Image (tube, grey):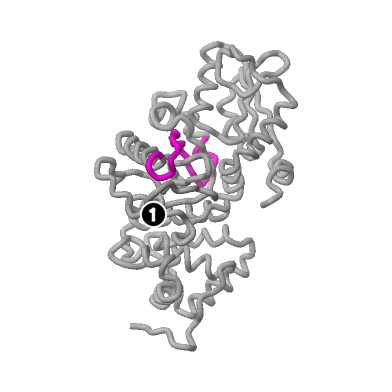
Amino acid sequence: MIRISSQSPTLPSHNSLNYELLSLMAICGEVPCTCSARLTASESYRKKVVTSLTHDKLLRIFSRHHLRGYRLGVRGKRLLLQQEPERFAFYLSGCSDTNAIKSEVSRRVRLHRIAQTYVTMLNAGAMIYRDEKPPIFSPAASGSIRIEQPCFYDSREMKEAELEMLKIRGSRMAGALFTSSRVFAVYNSMGFLPVFEPQVEQRAKVMLEQICRTKISFNLKASGLLLSDSMDILRILLEHSRTRKLDHFLLNDGYEHFYFLTNDSYGEALLQLLCHPEIIAQVNAALLQEFQSPPPNSRLECDAVDDSGSPVLFCYLPDIPRLYRFVSALDLLNITGILVCFDFQADALRPLCGDNIELQIIDFQKFKMRFLSFD
């Protein structure tokens, strides 16, 4: 057994890449090597950090079946447990997947999926560490819990709730995101089309909403959040929505709102929007300067109308069911409409647009400078 001597490395500072990698390996079990590029833009710095952590036996690279990932070394695990047990003991003890890591491809892909989700949440400003978050899912938690900052809880943390009648075993959820006014069931399909077991996911939805009532003391409907590696997944999902391949849980029977974001800087920026509804209101107000508010007796769900009365949908935060309902209504009523989106979303939405749908495109960089200057 390796012991940390006085000459052994000390725990890096919290605002360093060294610490971020060590902590993500601890709470995720294995972090795909590609995730490190999302933590810092400097490739040379990443290589320097990984080399240093490997040399100190805090990190090891595991490669098998074309999957490469970072795992904690024995010395790294002991260091984290000794110096920050409140933060890491939950993940680095017992027979959990994050402590006793299996080599099966399916197990490792699940760990990579969770790690990707954590990086997206971290970069968007959500709280991810157990000692910084309210213990929403802990059976020992009592009283009303106040959510002051966005907090992400992975699926293993959620299972602490021990709601025997509402088990989430088998759910594809990576976790849940709580904000001061909303809760999201978070899924990450990575580079694949999402697959849902509707009955299982409905139970998970009921569990989330029950947690809100009993622990947070506000009654609301949970929303869905689908993360993916590519906008192409959204394009394929929308194409399937016009065929018999449509996913009823995603489009109709699951969550009233099911947002689609990518695991990159674009998705992180949009996730910040979802966590700050006051900024969404500012964006919508700015867009309404180019349009008019929809009439109260509008025949379909929309955000605005243009000068000719054509309905307009703001889909810069792609809400898949709402987008599906809007396009279906245009087809059914045989009328024209407008979709407002960001430039990086246009290629995915364009195949959805026939002769009756026009795209109006927002420059993402200009938007970010104006509305996300705090980033």
3 over 116 or under it: above or below:
below
Where is mark 1, residue-wise? 109
Q: Nearer the viewer, residue 149 or 358?
A: 149
Report the quarter where the N terminus lies. Answer: bottom left
Which residue is rendered at x = 59% and y = 67% of the image?
15
Which residue is rendered at x = 62% and y = 16% of the image?
336
Q: Residue furthest left?
A: 164
Q: Position of residue 238 (x, y in %)?
A: 50, 30
Which residues make up the magenta segment? 213-234
Mark 1 lies on a secondary structure that is helix
Which residue is rendered at x = 52% and y = 52% of the image?
121
Q: Count neighbours of disc 1 (C-alpha within 10 A) and say few if under 14, some if 14 to 19, many if 20 or more.
A: some
124 lies left or right of 33: right
Residue 85 falls inside the magenta stretch:
no
361 over 46 or under it: above or below:
above
Q: Position of residue 169 (x, y in %)?
A: 29, 46
Q: Does the rendering let one see residue 80?
A: yes
Q: Does the rendering let one see residue 189?
A: no
163 lies left or right of 289: left
